Amino acid sequence: MGRSNIDYMKGATVSPEKIAWLEAHAPAGAGDALDLGCGARLYSKWLAQKGWRVQALDLDDPPAIPGVRPMAHDLEGGLPFPDQ
């Protein structure tokens, strides 16, 4: 049995490598971002702080973060948007 999402969020930290990738590939305020399997929403929060409009999806719906639209959703059923 794996850790629950709550346990994951308690010990979650950002990866410097992922932040470096985001800084190189996600210019400030460039539009909409979709964070699939967002977990603790660390990267959703980073993107929102840079001016992105963020939709974050995960199995659990953790507490809200300013600038991030959360959605609890199981991705095994596909994306929950009309155009998939």
Image (tube, rainbow, N blue to C red):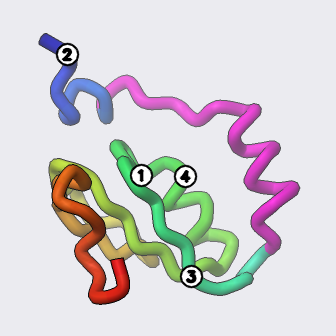
Q: Earlier in the sequence, mark 2 or mark 1?
A: 2
Q: Point out the image quarter for the C terminus.
A: bottom left
The residue where tag 1 is placed is 41
CA–CA distance between discs 4 and 3?
14 Å
Q: Amino acid at mark 1?
A: Arg
Residue 27 vertical placement versus 30 (above, below): above
Query: In percent of the image, x 69 and y 40: which residue is there?
Result: 18
Cβ–Cβ below 8 Å for labels 4 and 3?
no
Query: In percent of the image, x 37 and y 64: which residue is there?
Result: 56
Viewer-nearest of discs 3 and 1: 3
Q: Which mark is residue 80?
A: none
Q: Which secondary structure, mark 2?
A: loop
Residue 64 vertical placement versus 10 (above, below): below
- Estimate the x, y position of residue 15 in percent, counting from the top left: 64, 31
Q: Which residues are magenta?
A: 10-27
Cβ–Cβ below 8 Å for labels 2 and 3?
no
Instruction: For label 1, count other residues whose C-alpha is less than 10 Å away and answer few (under 14), some (14-19) or many (20+).
Output: many
The residue where tag 3 is placed is 32
In the orientation shown, which residue stands out farthest toward the top?
1
Instruction: For label 4, count other residues whose C-alpha is less than 10 Å away and answer few (under 14), some (14-19) or many (20+).
Output: many
CA–CA distance between discs 3 and 1?
15 Å
Cβ–Cβ below 8 Å for labels 3 and 1?
no
The residue where tag 4 is placed is 43
Number of labels in the image equals 4
Q: Earlier in the sequence, mark 4 or mark 3?
A: 3
Q: Amino acid at mark 4?
A: Tyr
Foreground pick, 21 / 7? 21
Q: Amino acid at mark 3?
A: Asp
- Estimate the x, y position of residue 37 in percent, counting from the top left: 36, 48
- Estimate the x, y position of residue 17 in percent, counting from the top left: 75, 33
Cβ–Cβ below 8 Å for labels 2 and 4?
no
